[in-house]
Image (cartoon, rainbow, N blue to C red):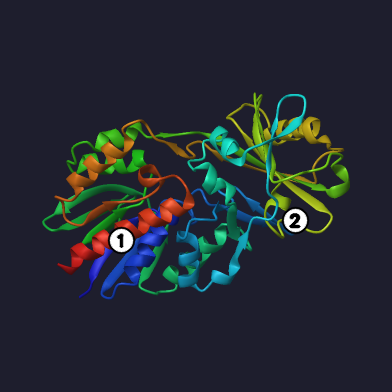
Amino acid sequence: MGVKVVVVGAGIAGLVAAWELARHGGIDVTVLEAERRPGGVIVTEQVEGFVVEGGPDGFLAGEPELPELANELGIGDRVVSQRARGTAVWTGKALEPIEEGHAAQLLGIEATGAEVKAGFRSFVNGMGEPVAALAQRLGGGQGGTLCFGLEVAGLTRQGSRWHVAITGGSTHDADGIVLALPAYAAGRLLESVGVADARVLAEVVYAPSITVSLAYRSEQIEGRLEGAGFVVASPVQVRACTYASQKFPDRAPDGHVLLRAYLAPMNGDPAQTAHAELAKIIGIRAEPLWSRVFYWNRGLPRYGARHAEHVAKVRQRLSRLPRLAIAGAGYDGAGVSACVRSGRDAARLIARATAR
């Protein structure tokens, strides 16, 4: 009988952890996801020939994790490079060039100026492509099982194994667990099995945000769109805007423009607000052809000063328990590449423990 591992969470970190475990012989992997879809904050939609990103739209070009994963999944030829370069800042009166590294800092992106200057990469059909490939392979019986709509209510240690309780009454027994959950959710489960210091994970703040994608005909844009977008020096509601149809290839049909605005939490209609502010900045005639709003009540994590120390202490406690690991943006970096790396590391930790 093979070793059974349960991965809780089907964001990119959880999917990669499951994929890595499934590649080890003799490990049976089950992924439990509370939502009805995989990917977590990675959401890509195809709308009337447009590629619409609800979450991250790419990864730093200098990071190897996504290309390596893509090659393993047989989609290495689907990686595309950033096309338009350069960022501006809206001063309230004009758009003025700004260093891309500084723009990243204004948006809370954790990267050096050199990393940002190297550009970004994505996939032909958006960041949802590796998520779909992982889900297809895991769900296709290649060493794994994907289960959606199942929320984990609690963990119980049973000797050297784990008992996983699901909201609604079902259960799973496992030899190992990977918690690929937001820090606040993982912290609650870890506290329930007596992990000291797990409460500090709740201190990781997940910043709320809203993204709005707006589609236009090219002739509706009066101003010249230069570069990949802009940030706002003193934002009212719109904090930044990406010229999505310029940043990466084939994001909009010919003769059309796709914009993506980033807003702080607000009352009212974010799409109307985004259109009104962008119309003043870059000059837009008439209403958008359509708009799509994504709400992230708990979006990207923001780490405190002693975050790494806190996570290290929790992991030290976990090392004393049977085959239990954590992975995801709440611990090892908020970028997609960091999540891939975190998922792999957690899976390798569990695989080594099961091989003893």
Residue at 38%, 66% in the rendered image: 19
Mark 1 or 2, nearer chain start:
2
Element at label 2: loop
Report the residue marked by disc 2. Answer: 252
The C terminus lies in which quarter of the figure? bottom left
Q: Position of residue 266 (x, y in %)?
A: 61, 27
Residue at 32%, 57% in the rendered image: 345
Q: Is residue 320 visible?
A: yes
Q: Nearer the viewer, residue 181 or 320?
A: 320
Element at label 1: helix
* Residue sitting at the far front: 114
Q: Is residue 246 left or right of residue 11?
A: right
Report the residue marked by disc 1. Answer: 347
Q: What label sits on residue 268 in the rendered view?
A: none
Q: Position of residue 93 (x, y in %)?
A: 77, 24
Q: In this view, does 275 lie above or below 40?
A: above
